[in-house]
Image (tube, rainbow, N blue to C red):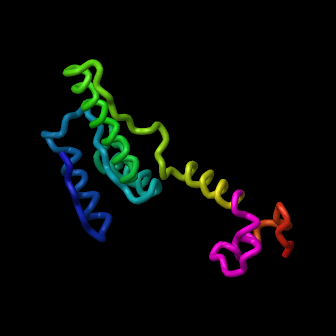
Amino acid sequence: MFTIIQSHRTENLVDQLLVQYQSKSQNIFEPFIVIVPSMVLGDWLDKTIASRAGISTLVRTKFWGQYQWTLMQDVLTRHNAYLLEVNPEAATLNVPEVAVLSPTVMQWRLFGYLTYYQALIVNDDTHPVNPLLASLIDEPQEGGRAR
């Protein structure tokens, strides 16, 4: 079940979370997924649940993006199984192994962009990235002027 609980007070959020966590309708063998804004809050929440409930088993804290990614993979896996059952020749859909907007992927894309356009950016004082890039390099490559 997907439940949204909103509050500015973490005590209220934890109280409501514990009600759901300790609910008899909650399957004790299924992960209890909680979407959190930061991993620090997720760690704190896990420890708080353990201290208040006596134990914290199968609590999984995830960012919204991680949860969404997992959900897409689960849905597409089931959908693909259905498609292949109906038609073994059917084309299937897959979610890439690495998130398109993961920090590592974004870092490498930015690095590639800055490397490719380095001389152009450094030579153009009006480019929005010029101050940042110019301060990071001693001498631009390929004929750009030094600062």
Q: Quadrant of the N terminus?
A: top left
Which residue is pictured at 34% across the width and 37% down the height? 73
Mark yes or no: residue 55 visible: no
- Counting from the top left corner in percent of width and height, residue 56 is at 34, 42
Q: Is residue 99 left or right of residue 113?
A: left
Nearest the camera: 133 or 125? Answer: 125
| Residue with the most extreme left position | 25
Instruction: From the top left corner, tell me how far across and down residue 28 is, in percent.
Output: 23, 33
Please check the rendered image and state whether residue 119 is part of the magenta-colored stretch, yes or no. yes
Residue situated in front as seen by the camera: 118 or 2:
118
Residue at point 24%, 51% (across, down)? 18
Percent position of residue 2, x then y: 20, 49
In the picture provided, is 81 more to the left or to the right than 127? left
On the rendered structure, is 42 left or right of 8?
right
Q: Is 86 a magenta residue? A: no
**As rendered, which of 92 and 97 lies closer to the eye?**
92
Residue depicted at 31% across the width and 43% down the height: 54
What residue range appears in magenta?
116-134
Query: Residue 112, located in which quarter of the rendered image?
Result: bottom right
